[in-house]
Image: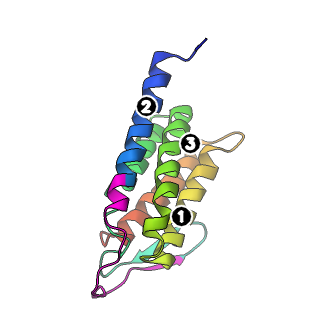
Amino acid sequence: MNTRHPIQTAARAAAATGAALLLTLAAGCSRPSDQAPAGKAAITAGTGNAAAVATAASPLGDLSAFRGIAADVAALVDQGQLPAAKTRIKALELAWDSAEAGLKPRAADDWHVLDKAIDRALKALRADAPTQADCKAALAALLGTFDALQGKA
């Protein structure tokens, strides 16, 4: 007997659909371009935050779908809805992990920088007693990393 709440079931279906969409987008462009970018995002890790100097978009390609999920999570954290944010960030984790094979070969260094930022956000939200401040900081750093890699910072 299924005792899941209808909203929980719908949320899971939406997360699965979103992950499938991201997989489709990532798989559609799994080969790096023939030309090297004019510049490359330089990312340096500070005290848990990523500082960036970007001169061109990352060869990882369009990261907007991943960033959109992260922005959704940040909005939930801003509203103090940490359990909902923890549930939503699972969609980012699944989509990111599923797209690894197509993205990582394009720019391994950039991929690792972003992967670590995602891991820090996951860790903050999955802490035994997550705090809004820690989660906000981790998500701000994650969004900043996305922006730096896309040449927006």
Residue numbers of the magenta segment: 24-44
Q: Which residue is mark 1?
A: 115
Horizontal relation, residue 37 to residue 114: left or right: left
Nearest the camera: 42 or 36?
Answer: 36
Task: Report the residue at 45% width, 59% height from top.
Answer: 99
Q: Is residue 148 above or below residue 85?
A: below
- Spatial separation of the CA atoms under disc 3 and disc 1: 21 Å
Q: Which mark is residue 75?
A: none
What residue sits 55% from the left and 75% below the top?
45
Secondary element at image label 3: helix
The residue positioned 50% from the left and 77% from the top of the image is 108
Horizontal side of residue 49 vs 37, given as left or right: right
Distance Cα–Cα, label 1 vs label 2? 25 Å
Residue at 56%, 53% in the rendered image: 121
Q: Tell whether 3 sits left or right of 32.
A: right
Query: In the rendering, at what x and y percent does residue 118 appear?
Result: 53, 58
The amino acid beneath tag 2 is Ala
Query: Does label 3 or label 1 sit earlier along the sequence?
Result: 1
For residue 132, which numbered disc appears in the image? 3
- What's the residue type where badge 3 is placed? Gln
User: For numbered disc 1, what is the local secondary structure?
Assistant: helix
* Circle 2 Cα neighbour tier, 10 Å, few/some/many (<14 / 14–19 / ≥20): few
Q: Secondary structure at mark 2?
A: helix
> What's the coloring here?
rainbow
| Badge 3 density bin: few <14, some 14–19, many ≥20, Cα 10 Å | some
Disc 2 marks which residue? Answer: 13
